[in-house]
Each structure stands twice: as structure tokens, then as C-alpha cells.
Amino acid sequence: MAGLKHPVTPDGRYFVVRGRLWRLSNPHLAAAVRAACVSDLMAARTAVKSAKAAGDRTAEAAAHHAVDNAKRELGERGEVWWTDGSPDLNRHMIKNTPYSAWYSDLKTAARRHQRIQFQNDDRHQAKERLV
């Protein structure tokens, strides 16, 4: 999950974009399987773009189907990859899920951090003016 710029739920199942949960891929996939699935996904997304540019609705539909298949293989869609019986909350608004308190705390901590950074920047600028 290195490189994600969006917060990831504590259980590692979802990442959050604009208040919505998106399921992450299955972390238990073998590296070679994951790489093949990601390659298939990228090729399918490229095919969607090409089909749209060409105005070929049949090819576009087939490419969207290929994207869906690759996402299912990665565990981002379809049957959940965890085994504890928790429901799939993919695409749910986080405020309507058990993760709402965690996310609220996360946002509060982020605002606090921004406020401290802003105050530190103000102090630094004030010191520079005195020099």
C-alpha cells in the first residue's frame, strides 16, 4: 500500500476518497499474480480509452468488462477477500459505516496538524521580518 495518498482504514480493507470507501486489492495475492492482474487492468483501461476515442461502443463495452474482470481478480470487486464475516462496504459513504468515528478522528488530527504548521509558518515569517 506504499504510495497511497488517501487514508487507509485501520484494517487495511479500504481507502477513502472524498468521504467514500473504496476496496483495496487482496494483500494475500502472490506478487506474480498481483503483477499480472495489474498489467491486465492497465491494458483494459487503455482499451477503454482507445475505444472511447474511436467511438466503438462494442469495443468499449468489452474493455469495461475486462476492467471489471481484472478488478475482481485483484479482490477490489466481487467476493470479499477477508474471512471474518464483515460486510462489504465498498463505495459506501464513510459517515454511514463503522469507520465513521475513526475517519472523524483522522480529519480532526489532520486539521490540528495543519493549524500547528500554519502557526509555525507564521512564527517563522515573523522572525524573518525581525532580522
Image: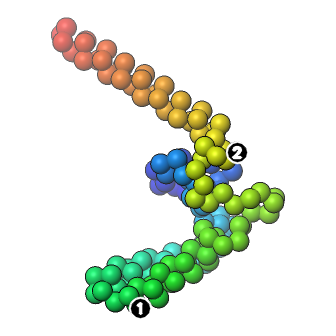
Measuring from the top left, give residue 122's x and y in whole percent: 30, 17
Which of the numbered marks, if any, corresponds to residue 58? Answer: 1
Q: Marks 1/2: CA distance?
A: 40 Å
**Residue position marked by numbered label 2 in the rendering:** 98
* Colouring: rainbow
Residue 94's place in the image compared with 101, above or below, is below
Quarter of the image with the N terminus is: bottom right
Measuring from the top left, give residue 59's x and y in whole percent: 40, 90
Question: In the displayed structure, does residue 47 sit left or right of residue 1?
Answer: left
* Residue in front for this viewpoint, 49 or 118: 49
Quadrant in the rendering for residue 129: top left
Question: In the displayed structure, does residue 24 sit left or right of residue 98?
Answer: left
Quadrant in the rendering for residue 25: bottom right
Quadrant in the rendering for residue 95: top right
Measuring from the top left, give residue 40's x and y in whole percent: 49, 81
Measuring from the top left, give residue 62's x and y in whole percent: 47, 88
Which of the numbered marks, if any, corresponds to residue 113? Answer: none
Residue 45 visible in the displayed image? yes
| Kind of residue at disc 2 | Pro
Q: Residue at x 47, y 55 (%)?
A: 3
Q: Residue furthest right?
A: 84
